Image (cartoon, rainbow, N blue to C red):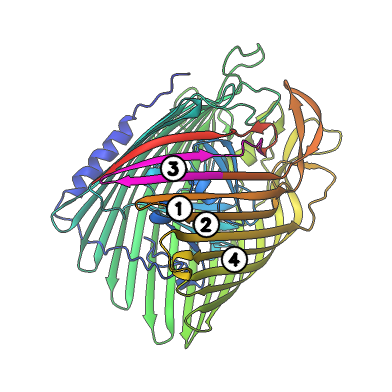
Amino acid sequence: MTNIRLSFTVNFAILIFVFTVLCISNDLYAQEKDTINLNEVVLKTHLGRTFKEEGKLTRLITRSEIESLPVQTLSETLDLLPALDLRQRGMSDLQTDISIRGGTFNQNMVLLNGINVTNPHTGHNTLSLPVSFFGVDQIEVLKGAGGKLYGYNAFSGAINFTTGLNKSPLQVELMGGDFGFKSAQAKTYFATGSEFEHHLMAGYQEGDGHQENTDFESLNLFYHGKYQQNKTQFDWMAGYANKGFGAFNFYTPRYSNQFEEVTTQFAAIKWNQDLGKLQLNANIYGLRSNDRFELFRENPPTWYTQHNKHQTDVVAAQIRANYTSALGKTSLHSEWRRELINSNVLGEPQTSVKEDENLLYTATKEAEFNHFFARNILDVTLAHQYNWKDLTLNIGLKSLHVEGVTKFYPGADLGYKINRSNYVVASVNKSMRLPTFTDLFYKGPTQISNPNLRAEEALTYDLTYAFKNYSLKAQAAIFYRDAKNLIDWTLQPGDEVFRSMNIAELGSFGVEVETDFNLAVIFNTKFLNNLRLGYSYLDNADANEDFESTYAFDFLKHKLTANLVISPLENMQWSIGGFYQKRNGGYQRFVNEEAIGFVPYDDVITLNTKISYKYKKLTFLLDVFNILDQDAFDYGNILLPGRWAKFGVSFSL
């Protein structure tokens, strides 16, 4: 296996040192505890508000639910939700494109403890998080436009990964399995005094892969500190991730022997202050991503002169004020965010090296980077929430200023609590997405970008109904998204390369249903635990264009999900679940790097299972992915693994 660099940079080591000193200092202010209400489908995030407080209904996945599912990755967990399309190129969260309600993989916002960690380089790195699957305590999924509240990335939805809720002093998990898979994960919690909390997580995994050039190796390190006193609270975080993997056919099937390595560094500090009617919160954060892509891992041809190397930086500051009065709750939110890239491919060519060494504001002096691009984004949002009896009205207006251009994006949500068990929300929101750096600048043997791409915009209408009682939770939604200037890589008739372009207009109509039956209560038995069923349908009105689309038209038309959890023995839990999906569109089929014709996507049935048995402080696990050993493709010409068994043991204090 190619040796993958796993060393820290000096800058990151300094960040870790600074945050460690802060966490033991007695000069910090306090942080209020996270609040979780498991009777609701929402989570109070570190942003200080819930999606429901904004008139939104979400899907909350707790750690206990995650552990009951037949999953071992974040991708597999999210794939059991209807209306979510997880298109994996590499397993074990190496590279997964997330689509919500038929949006493309670049149209989602990803948050870590309420911090926007969306990568402006490319949505392919969405799950290149500094924390691993083992370290995530909860996942909150918002389906539908969330730009009014969370920013321009939340075009079709948002996902928030939460850490720092686990209070176990020590948890260790060791796993091994088919295809040379090995994994070691650990996390610990401890307190210093009555005010400080510390959460440390580390994970390593490697594998030989299920076919040629699919080997991988990854490392995650993450620290989350908390401090609280009275009504003041602080969070601070730092994380590092490195993963390298054989990228068989990832970006083009014409050259199959590809390789990629992605490194992520992250640091953030947050403050919340409760002043009664006035609540304030602020955060500053930085994110760095280094991506090295090799079109030819070995034996490159003479015309291939260099690998693609990119260094993407994000630095941002955010402040928010919420004021409650007799007229309701008024919120003012502002965020400044600077996104930049130094690269040997992406960005504008640099004819001379600039003298300023501050990489946040100029191009780096390193000779390997001769392209640079940066943009400043100022986001100001004014919103008001009014409650009258069982009605909740939330209206807002976002002003987005990007490099001299200002646009406005309004939105409104109206919620009605019918009774204790029934709730309905109607929404209309306008959202947008800026092109990624790849959309704007990438050029390769089979792709040509367009630096003049316009921002995507959409107007989304949504009606959602939720029901819950002691034995059943259910949500049903119907939506329509009218999108303009959608960005996609397309192959026009008679052309030989894919080009990034704006698609004039695309209308998307969808329906989704999800239910959770508490079988233990319904049948008054310990043998049956719960049954979750879900279904989603999507149709894009203009998905039959006379050109080949890479992403926009390859949506899931039908998706059916199911998961059953039973307890056949005391201390034993057995879950079996999976999904059926029918994908629209098709792809150019390649064999031995030669095109043989266009083929439609086949229907896919994926079934997974997991058995766990707890003995004292030990838990034994058997997890089997794709137990039917079906051939499946999320992307054309990239075969997913067949049957994959993993066995492990975990220890918990």
Disc on the earlier residue, 2 or 1: 1
Category of crowding for the residue at label 2, using alpha-carbon neighbours closer than 10 angstroms: few (below 14), some (14–19), many (at least 20): many
Residue linked to disc 2? 158
- Residue at 31 percent across and 63 percent down: it is 34
Q: Nearer the viewer, mark 4 or mark 2?
A: 2
Q: Judge whether residue 296 is colored magenta.
A: no
Q: Amino acid at mark 3?
A: Leu
Residue linked to disc 4? 409
Residues at badges 1 and 4 in contact (C-beta under 8 Å)?
A: no
Q: Residue 308's image quarter?
A: top right
Q: Amino acid at mark 2?
A: Ala
Looking at the image, residue 434 sits to the left or right of residue 222; the answer is right
Q: Secondary structure at mark 1?
A: strand
Residue linked to disc 3? 129
Tell me how far mark 3 sits from mark 2, CA to CA: 15 Å
Q: Judge whether residue 610 is colored magenta.
A: yes
Q: Which mark is residue 111?
A: 1
Q: What range is drawn magenta here? A: 608-633
